[in-house]
Image: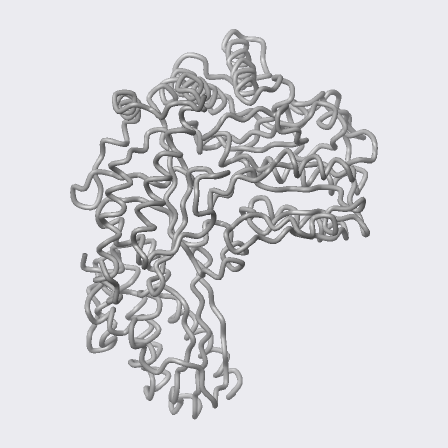
Amino acid sequence: MDLYQELILEHYKRPVRAGLRDPFEAEVHHVNPTCGDEVTLRVHVTGTGDEAVVEDVSYDAMGCSISVASASILAEEITGESVAHARKTFEAMRSMLTSKGEDPGDEELIGDGVALSGVAKYPARVKCALLSWMAFTDALHQAEGANA
Amino acid sequence: MAAAPLSDEELARIRADFPILSRTVRGGHPLVYLDSGATSHKPRQVLDAERGFYERTNAAVHRGAHQLSEEGTDAYETARATIAAFIGARADEVVFTRNATEAINLVAYAFTNGAHGGGGGRGDRFTLGPGDEVLVTEMEHHANLIPWQEACRRTGATLRWVPVTPDGRLDLTDLDRLLTERTKVFAFTHVSNVLGTLNPVRELTERAHAVGALVVLDACQSVPHLPVAVDDLGVDFLAFSGHKMFGPLGIGVLWARPELLDEMPVFLTGGSMIETVTMEGSTYAPAPQKFEAGVPVAAQAVGLAAACDYLTALGLDRVHAHEQALTQRLLEGLAARPWVRVLGPDGLRERGGAVAFVVDGVHAHDVGQVLDDRGVAVRVGHHCAWPLHRALKAQASTRASFAAYSTSAEVDALLEALDRVPAMFGLEVAV
């Protein structure tokens, strides 16, 4: 089964940058109503406009291996990046996950995220992989409002 | 004497009636379908009956005077009689809806409509307001919870619930405090869709009636799997769905005591359900027609009647005995795997054919995916019973559920596929 690559199981067992931390500008709580997966996610953003940087992404994720690994990969790939780069990474992840397998994923942009490419062939699991990324964009939007 | 389970020869004949059971999934694995609690498959007899209606009779029933309309109406009403007889009821006590969820909503909305002077009803039994209470249980499917939450919100009534014990039974310790003369409705499930728990319907109904409450029974997981007769149960309303009992999608059934249908205000309104209509106002047809607005689900009713005939020919007592044997095999197999925790009753006593379990450290979605990879189809998640999972301290679970066509070989296939889980997710277990 190409869904559970070793990298995903690594992130699931030892999630990167897990836990909720201060400081943060926005905290969101997203759920996947079909299975009850939940993620609470905080972002800490400094600067505004082109200078804005995601200083920290911290999270508490309860769910399946795919949703927890995806949150871990998000924190790994996004922390320390500019907000503009974070948005591009999100778009690349979303494109890959919703492509039904057509888009293998841009490793330059999404790094370990390519390990989740197998999810695209399992429509019931796409939501799991997207959960924390949707939460992140929501939190980012709120944080930018707070910083404006 | 207890009914005998189905023999291997009988089982082979039954399985040959279900075309889908011979297909393969996920790269050639034979389908091992253990998700009949979500929806059952349909035998040729049901598919033929529904197709036959469309091919020979198709008409908007209860309208028109042409021959097709006459024959269509006859087929629809004959189906109603068959389906009613299946639960030991009379034809005019059975209302067709789109699904069981709509059947329960029908009752919940009748109470709300009664509180607002809704038409088509008589008497004041169907009212809810501040000071009134609706009692449900913590093990309900969302379909028998949210309609009551909303009815209470609309009317100012208060929702109360019976908690569950750690082993997945109703905790009746405080029932006298929860079920009082303030209780207008007690709505609960016959068999838990998650745990398989079979609730003591007669006892609960007697206690509800003693305080004047009406009883609404969710029978979605009992009517397809064991003999159910409304007179034996004593309840006031009973809802079930067609698609979980070898019938088509798109039809549900509400049974009610006839005097209650007569007193109950209408829910959905429009064509078919009227007696006279003027621009100023309308009067309504007698039940069951007054609850069946719009063109009726005739082909689905004909298909469901064929499903009832099919189950009757098998014998519900034997279907139950068969599913009990499978449940026992699965419970024993799971008990031999200490890394698996079964939710709900651990024995066969007062139990139906659904088994939910968790593998601690591995999410149900992942368990289900590993099973699916071997062609084993189960339900994963909270199975539309989120509060029950919270009460049992499980975020989600994996559920296997049976039907008459399920086999012991399928139970074994599930257990074999399940054994891949610990190694795959790095659980340290003795296998």
Image position, residue B211 (x, y; %)? 78, 40
Residue plotted at (48% across, 83% down): A144
Q: Quadrant of residue B338?
A: bottom left
Q: Quadrant of the C terminus of chain B?
A: bottom left
- Vertical order, B14 against B238 (above or below): above
Could you tell me if residue A88 is visible in this image? no
- Position of A100 with respect to B180 (left or right) is left
Residue plotted at (35% across, 63% down): A64
Q: Quadrant of residue B276?
A: top right
Could you tell me if residue B8 is visible in this image? yes
Q: Nearer the viewer, residue B280 or B348?
A: B348
Image position, residue B428 (x, y; %)? 25, 67
Q: Nearer the viewer, residue B275 or B345?
A: B345
User: Which residue is farthest left?
Assistant: B28
- Position of A106 with respect to B297 (left or right) is left
Q: Quadrant of the N terminus of chain B?
A: top left
Image position, residue A19 (x, y; %)? 41, 81
Colour scheme of this structure image? one colour
- Position of B72 with respect to B258 (left or right) is left
Q: Nearer the viewer, residue B256 or B345?
A: B345
- Position of B303 with respect to B8 (left or right) is right
Image position, residue A62 (x, y; %)? 41, 68
Residue plotted at (69% across, 25% down): B257
User: Which residue is farthest top?
Assistant: B67
- Vertical order, B25 against B71 (above or below): below
Q: Nearer the viewer, residue B136 or A34?
A: B136
- Vertical order, A12 against B322 (above or below): below
The number of discs equals 0
Residue plotted at (81% across, 51% down): B131
